[in-house]
Image: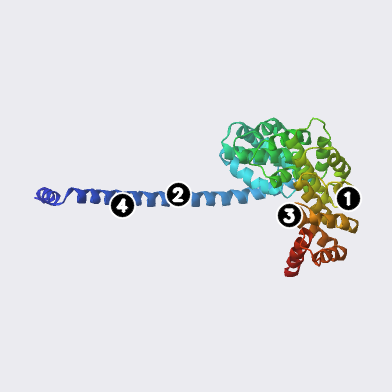
Amino acid sequence: MIHALLEAVSYSVSEPTRLIIFLIFILLFLTVMLSVYIIYLRFKIDRRNRYLKKKHGEWQTLLLEYLSGDTAFSRIAGMINKSDFEYFSDYISRFFTNIKGEDFLKLVTLVNEIGLANYYLQKLKKGNKWQKVYAAFFLGMIHEKKAIPDLIDGLNDKYYMVSFACAQGLASLGAKEHLFKILNVLTQREDWSEDKVAEIILELGPDAGDDLLELLKQADLEAQRKYLIVELLGFFKHLPALNLLTRMLAETEDDELKIKIIKVLGELSSPTSLSVLEAHLDYGNWRVRSSAVKALGKIGDEKMAQPLKERLSDENWWVRYNAAWSLSHIGKTGIDLLEEAAHKKSKDPAREISLQVLSEIELG
């Protein structure tokens, strides 16, 4: 009888309606399954968090006892399973970032005895991209020199994050002998910004500028590498580079390199570069002239007031504009020259640009 009733309902319902009912049942089923899966994940995460909380308490006690000499590393090694390696390495990294000297060396010994160093050496070679990223970070942090060959290979990895992590690992290891290799890769990658490069080089230590300076002296250095090194020297405000950069500016015919050097000389703000910068106020390329007037404004020497005033009549608007602002940076002498040009009766470029910049100064 029930079967007959269902058949009667089935026949009484049109084909589109049956399809809608079928889809509703499918959606309800998927909703239930998704809810079950979310509950399962929540349970799994909670169980893992409880496990890690317990382990962290045990590990903290053991590590503090180990560092104080009350526990041998063999005891800790016997309590760390391979399944806990990644959890333990994440936990112990907090200790590495806060200790130095003898305690640091003791932790490195522990990491090697447990097998963590070899574990991450393998991940660096054959892991997925995120495993490689963490492996590069961890091996650099513990100063594992065996990782250097694989870190160098990782610089060319197709994934930006792996390449960056490997460069950071090399920097953490203080591998300055590979500075040229690092720069070589960086100049070929479009996904590396100047700030990121500077971040890597800075980790090599306070004397990284000296190493960059030595590289810049190489006669066969490619243009892109020169550009990058010059920018980095400016980023570090490396004063010992002044003499070499001044000489390069006077000798090079590469306008792009001239612009980058002029920018750095402005950042270094040394009066010793005034003459070579002044010599470029009449340069053929307006971008070079514009960079030169901006650099002179940063140095702010009153002796350059008159040469900058002459650039107020430059054929290029940007040169005139930057010259006017540079005069304002010199101080009262520069402002007086701007006002003098602004009060001219004739409508020349110097008058117009002076009026514009003075009004901008007045508006703040």
Corner quadrant of residue 124: top right
- Which residue does the numbered mark 2 point to in the structure image? 41
The CA span between labels 1 and 2 is 67 Å
Residue drawn at x 82%, y 51% is: 266
Q: Mark on residue 274?
A: 1
The CA span between labels 3 and 1 is 23 Å
Q: Mark on residue 31?
A: none
As shown in the figure, which amino acid type bears the numbered disc 3? Trp
- In the image, which is nearer the foreground, mark 4 or mark 3? 3
As shown in the figure, which amino acid type bears the numbered disc 1? Leu
- Which residue does the numbered mark 3 point to in the structure image? 317
- Which residue does the numbered mark 4 point to in the structure image? 28
316 left or right of 302 in image: left
Of pointers 4 and 3, the one earlier in the residue sequence: 4
| Crowding near the residue tagged with mark 4, few <14, some 14–19, many ≥20 C-alpha atoms within 10 Å | few
| Crowding near the residue tagged with mark 3, few <14, some 14–19, many ≥20 C-alpha atoms within 10 Å | some
Q: Secondary structure at mark 3?
A: helix
- In the image, which is nearer the foreground, mark 1 or mark 2? 1
Q: Secondary structure at mark 2?
A: helix
154 left or right of 238 in image: left
Corner quadrant of residue 184: top right
Q: Position of residue 173 (x, y in %)?
A: 74, 38
- In the image, which is nearer the foreground, mark 4 or mark 1? 1
Name the foreground residue: 165 vs 269: 269
| Crowding near the residue tagged with mark 2, few <14, some 14–19, many ≥20 C-alpha atoms within 10 Å | few
Q: Position of residue 340 (x, y in %)?
A: 84, 65
Q: Secondary structure at mark 1?
A: helix
As shown in the figure, which amino acid type bears the numbered disc 4? Leu
Label 2 with label 4: CB-CB less than 8 Å: no
The CA span between labels 4 and 1 is 78 Å
